[in-house]
Image: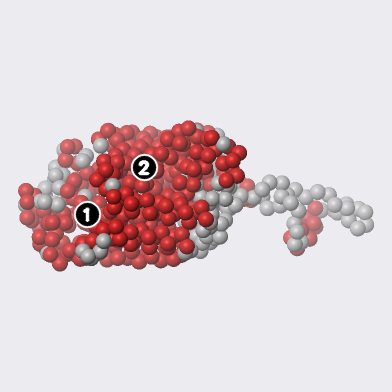
């Protein structure tokens, strides 16, 4: 977006160099071959960015989307992978809360709830694309390989407001991680009642912490893909079970539809929270490739899989509810188990995989957020000292990154084991209000500020979210309405 024409400049301007005979060469072109063959080319008049971003310019530039990057390398030596980014999106976007979504859509019926889910998904994906656009712009302008949401807020809204965002973001992230740790611990305790509750809470988080802190991302990606596979197999099994039992009633349930706002609107906030994956978007931009269009493609592909899962699960459960009578509806899981008790194993498999993949997604992205938050605090009180102490905190598997990764996983274990009841209200607050504020209201506001600072010119780059300021206004209004609806 910012350096769309700079990539075409390969060499610095040539100066006139006398030939051995003392005469100037007729054409400067004759000097290009020796320069190309030289092992030490002349210095460039500007420092190269750490990445060669491939933005597409407006009108004058050829619209050639870059190919999918599967195995390029980032500036810190970490391999990039488009499909690793997609699997991370799928794992983080799908949470166990998806299983309870039909409880919010039962009043409206299959067709109205499907329309509400599709609109909610379009809103969520549009907001996430804005975060990706801001992330790539910040990485390009700062010459870094990864940014955080706090960094985006600080660069657009100022350091003071960035500090507020850092506090709210930390509350939200810790709340989500605590919920994942608590859910996984509960599943482990159900399968192995003899295991100590603290140990049950600590088993998978400790495994994930060691995997992320001491192993390359390729290993983390492999585990995440296996868990995504388990999740897809489990939800497919649940959908097939529901279709086999209520096949005849699913078509009949399409005849019921309630289009009143009171029946439709309650499902929209739940769907937005279910399908959102804003938390990991800056990290996705780090590993997806060198182009913001790679990030948009990954967001669309990775976000479409949870959408299909949610739509199919919602249709099956509402069809079963129509067969048994909505008055007897006592939750999707209980309804499915009442018609087929063998569905308990796929339910547990899906819940574990959804919680585990979400925890991995939060754990790989949150350390950078904490790093930037600490940098912001230190710079606030001692700018010179902060720039020295934390300048090498990111990149690779350094000591600071290992400590932060283990800390963000160990602290939730103690919270779940000893302060679970006291944390319940904070979890509800962070999961609703903080989520709406951070990932609903802020992205369009920051994008508007960023685009207003960027002066339009013939060489400026186009925005990856169409609609201009009108689209930003719509997203902002929807976010405010959802916040008040909560």
Q: Which residue is mark 1?
A: 99
In the shown orientation, is residue 287 left or right of residue 177?
Answer: right
Instruction: Name the quadrant of the N terminus.
Output: top right
Q: Nearer the viewer, mark 1 or mark 2?
A: 2
Local packing at callout 2 (Cα closer than 10 Å; few below 14, some 14-19, many 20+) is some
Q: Is residue 94 visible?
A: no
* Residue 398 percent across, percent down from the top left: 53, 56
For mark 2, what is the residue?
Answer: 171
Residue 189: image quadrant is: bottom left
Residue drawn 36% across the image and 58% down it: 205
Residue drawn at x 21%, y 64% is 193
Asked whether residue 32 is in view, the answer is: yes
In-image side of 358 versus 296 (left or right): left
Viewer-nearest residue: 438 or 470 = 438
- Labelled pair 1, 2 in contact (Cβ < 8 Å): no
Could you say where residue 125 lies in the image, as x and y percent from the top left? 36, 47
Against 124, is 403 above or below?
below
Alpha carbon separation for disc pair 1 and 2: 25 Å
Number of on-image labels: 2
Within 10 Å of disc 1 (Cα), the crowding (few <14, some 14-19, many 20+) is many
Vertical position of residue 216 compared to residue 422: above or below: below
Which is nearer the eye, 294 or 74?
Answer: 74
- Residue in view at x 36 percent, y 42 percent: 171
Coloring basis for residues: secondary structure
In the rendered structure, the answer to whether residue 409 lies left or right of residue 385 reads left
Mark 1 secondary-structure assignment: helix
Residue 7: x, y in percent? 62, 50
Label 2 SS: helix
Whichever of labels 1 and 2 marks the residue nearer the N terminus, that label is: 1
Q: Residue at x 46, y 46 (%)?
A: 370
The image quadrant where one finds the C terminus is top left
């Amino acid at each position: 977006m910012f350096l769309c024409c700079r990539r075409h400049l390969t060499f610095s301007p040539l100066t006139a160099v006398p030939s051995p005979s003392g005469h100037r060469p007729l054409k400067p072109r004759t000097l290009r071959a020796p320069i190309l063959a030289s092992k030490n080319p002349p210095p460039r008049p500007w420092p190269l960015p750490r990445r060669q971003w491939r933005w597409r310019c407006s009108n004058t530039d050829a619209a050639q989307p870059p190919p999918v990057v599967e195995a390029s390398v980032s500036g810190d030596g970490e391999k990039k992978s488009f499909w690793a980014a997609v699997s991370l999106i799928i794992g983080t976007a799908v949470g166990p809360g998806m299983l309870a979504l039909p409880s919010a859509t039962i009043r409206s019926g299959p067709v109205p709830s499907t329309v509400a889910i599709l609109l909610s998904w379009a809103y969520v994906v549009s907001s996430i694309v804005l975060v990706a656009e801001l992330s790539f712009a910040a990485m390009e302008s700062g010459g870094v390989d990864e940014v955080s949401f706090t960094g985006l807020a600080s660069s657009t809204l100022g350091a003071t407001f960035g500090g507020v965002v850092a506090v709210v973001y930390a509350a939200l992230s810790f709340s989500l991680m605590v919920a994942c740790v608590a859910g996984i611990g509960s599943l482990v305790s159900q399968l192995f009642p003899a295991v100590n509750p603290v140990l049950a809470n600590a088993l998978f988080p400790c495994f994930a912490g060691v995997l992320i802190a001491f192993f390359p991302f390729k290993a983390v990606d492999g585990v995440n893909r296996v868990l995504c596979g388990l999740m897809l197999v489990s939800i497919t099994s649940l959908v097939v079970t529901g279709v086999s039992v209520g096949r005849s009633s699913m078509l009949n349930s399409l005849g019921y539809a309630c289009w009143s706002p009171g029946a439709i609107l309650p499902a929209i906030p739940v769907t937005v929270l279910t399908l959102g994956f804003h938390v990991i978007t800056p990290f996705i931009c780090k590993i997806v490739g060198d182009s913001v269009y790679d990030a948009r493609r990954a967001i669309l592909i990775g976000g479409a899989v949870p959408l299909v899962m949610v739509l199919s699960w919602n249709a099956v459960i509402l069809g079963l509810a129509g067969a048994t009578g909505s008055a007897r509806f006592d939750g999707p899981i209980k309804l499915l188990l009442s018609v087929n008790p063998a569905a308990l194993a796929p339910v547990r498999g899906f819940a574990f995989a959804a919680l585990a993949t979400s925890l991995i997604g939060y754990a790989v992205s949150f350390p950078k957020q904490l790093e930037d938050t600490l940098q912001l605090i230190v710079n606030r009180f001692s700018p010179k000292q902060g720039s020295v102490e934390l300048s090498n905190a990111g990149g690779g598997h350094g000591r600071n990154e290992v400590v932060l990764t283990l800390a963000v996983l160990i602290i939730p274990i103690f919270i779940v084991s000893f302060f679970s009841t006291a944390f319940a209200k904070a979890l509800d607050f962070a999961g609703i209000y903080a989520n709406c504020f951070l990932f609903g209201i802020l992205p369009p506001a920051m994008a508007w500020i960023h685009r207003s600072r960027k002066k339009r010119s013939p060489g400026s780059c186009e925005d990856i979210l169409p609609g201009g300021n009108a689209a930003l206004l719509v997203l902002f209004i929807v976010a405010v309405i959802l916040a008040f609806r909560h």
